[in-house]
Image (cartoon, coloured by chain):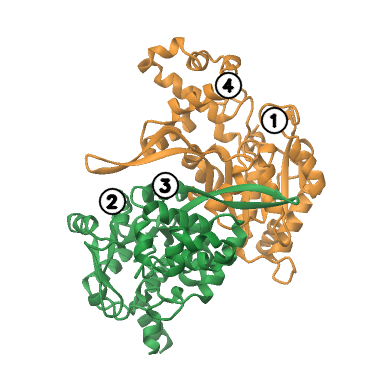
Chain colours: A green, B orange
Amino acid sequence: MLFLALAAAQAEPLPSWRDSESRTQIISFVAAVTDPGSPDFVPPPERIAVFDNDGTLWSEQPFYFQLAFAIDRVRALADDHPEWATTQPFKAALEGDLEALVASGKQGLLELLMASHAGMTTEAFAAIVRDWAASARHPRFDRPYTELVYQPMLELLEYLRANGFQTWIVSGGGIEFMRPWALDVYGVPPEQVIGSSIKTRFELRDGKPVLVRLPEMNFIDDKEGKPVAINQHIGRRPIAAFGNSDGDLQMLQWTTAGEGRRLGVIIRHTDAEREWAYDRESHIGRLDKALDAAARHGWVVVDMKQDWERVYGFESAE
Amino acid sequence: MLFLALAAAQAEPLPSWRDSESRTQIISFVAAVTDPGSPDFVPPPERIAVFDNDGTLWSEQPFYFQLAFAIDRVRALADDHPEWATTQPFKAALEGDLEALVASGKQGLLELLMASHAGMTTEAFAAIVRDWAASARHPRFDRPYTELVYQPMLELLEYLRANGFQTWIVSGGGIEFMRPWALDVYGVPPEQVIGSSIKTRFELRDGKPVLVRLPEMNFIDDKEGKPVAINQHIGRRPIAAFGNSDGDLQMLQWTTAGEGRRLGVIIRHTDAEREWAYDRESHIGRLDKALDAAARHGWVVVDMKQDWERVYGFESAE
């Protein structure tokens, strides 16, 4: 009986995925590259899968969660910055005026980012992120942001690791913003998290070495930057890539252009009820060019509404 | 009998190390952090050891091996560049005039680096490095450069991995120069190699994505850069660091300043006969400030002449 139960468990991975074409294609890929008798066999050290984060592993609406973090930080620091009450983009952040915030443009968002993300040591910043992740709540679901991760993707991460894959995050989000919780939430250790970054500087403070976060961009891990970062951090080409937007197009191209069997997957946001529905016209997570490319390259397009039995882990408890 | 042999093998790690204080300190550290009953116990995912490369894992005399590679590349490309016969630093490289090469200064060396390391795709460069590593020979030993790795350090890498450590390389040398052979020679996979780098650019060539190496520095992984790179790539503080020169000082400071038991090790070049002897006055691999710091911080200083039964693996065969 136990044996049968175990066999059944092994035979049915990805329980939150409905019996769909996309699920079948993913499982068939994994079977092919892990079967030593298959012409598509890939040795474990080369089984590298890369995942975008925002919109692929967790939600990104009504706006990127890291922007919510930046706004919360500006509010927390406002007492020390009375000038923010009358200066954009800080005024907009303090008033929760998203429209004005967006109107402040790239430069405004960059200022907000630097004011909220720089000036402290790396250790102090990690503690700030951990506190925020434990206390902040998403406006629509009134839950910690880290609960807005997709249950089917958590199962996919587990399933791939159980099949000898390394699962890497390759996100436009901040590398130091993700690392403090990525292990607990995704099972992904810090050294397998890649993201955008600001510069840091080594200093001795009272003889104690620290890394200080500087208000200067180091690397933007988006679009053409993703293959560059993959090469820099991993040094080998992934065999599977998962994304959801045009920011992931080059990562998918880079991954699936390699020799041998490859898997490209796009998560499509089609479920306005359980999550959000958006694609070609969205300002956040726009999926346009990458959707056209998916058809040309034979990438799997996951339809969240159709293919997922549930979206979030907490749904089952309600 | 088999059991006893196995037990003996386990009881005597690091066979090329003489029974010395430095060997004892390394083994005692590993025993302490791997014993679940020890107050110094560290769980396996946090057992991160970082190694400098030049002068720590392989030799760096009469000059850095990557410079030998750059000179060989310039010679290989000289037919396409007749102007190099009369332009420095290329003339010096073609004539093997090291003095003139050094006299060309930092700018000259940078030009040599860019001419030899940039302009091709990452895949083409990896193939060039592999060919060079297989064919070039060290002037003193008339052997491939990759045979000038220290046998005691190979044993140390193995020993640490057998004890659940991740062994990372953190080198001033080029990240893409080391990766093509680091797995075969050191057992270190590409994703655990950190080094200096030039920028790369993502391009589609005839619809095929490539990464092109650009003649522009991206990051110099030396001195203060080493803790910065460790944070960027690994995202957690190592518990053990191995270096040999002032370029490793900050990496050793950063590593050993962490909480709990830590190990800092400096390999000191004391053996003019089997290898080279140099320290405070050397232009290559200068060991001065870091040697003073070792005494202050209680870092282990390995005396190559005294502590190592043999230096290179090929010695035993002779």
Disc 4, SS = helix
> Pointer 1 indicates a residue of which chain?
B
Which amino acid type corresponds to the residue marked 2 in the rendered image?
Gln
Mark 3, mark 4: which one is toward the viewer? 4
Dot 3 crowding, Cα within 10 Å, few <14, some 14–19, many 20+: some
Q: Tag 2's secondary structure?
A: helix
Query: Where, quadrant-wise, is the N terminus of chain A in this rendering?
Result: bottom left
CA neighbours of label 2 inside 10 A, class few (<14), some (14 to 19), many (20+): many
Asked if residue B5 lies left or right of residue A277, the reply is right
Relative side of B97 to B176, left or right: right
User: Can the viewer see residue B13 in this picture?
Assistant: no
Marking on residue B275: 1
Same chain, labels 1 and 2: no
Label 4 resides on the chain identified as B
Which of the two discs, 2 and 4, sits closer to the camera? 4
In the current view of this chain or complex, which residue is farthest to the top?
B86
Asked if B308 appears above or below B168 in the picture, the reply is: above
Judged from the image, the secondary structure of the residue bearing numbered disc 1 is: loop
Mark toward the start of the polypeptide (2 vs 3): 3
Q: Are the residues at dot 2 and dot 4 in contact (C-beta closer than 8 Å)?
A: no
Cβ atoms under marks 2 and 3 closer than 8 Å: no
Q: Name the one closer to the observer, B314 or B227.
A: B227
Closer to the camera in the image, A46 or A84: A84
Q: What secondary structure is found at the residue carrying circle 3?
A: helix
Q: Residues within 10 Å of mark 1 (few under 14, many from 20)?
A: some
Instruction: Please give the residue where the numbered disc 4 appears in the rendered image.
Output: B105
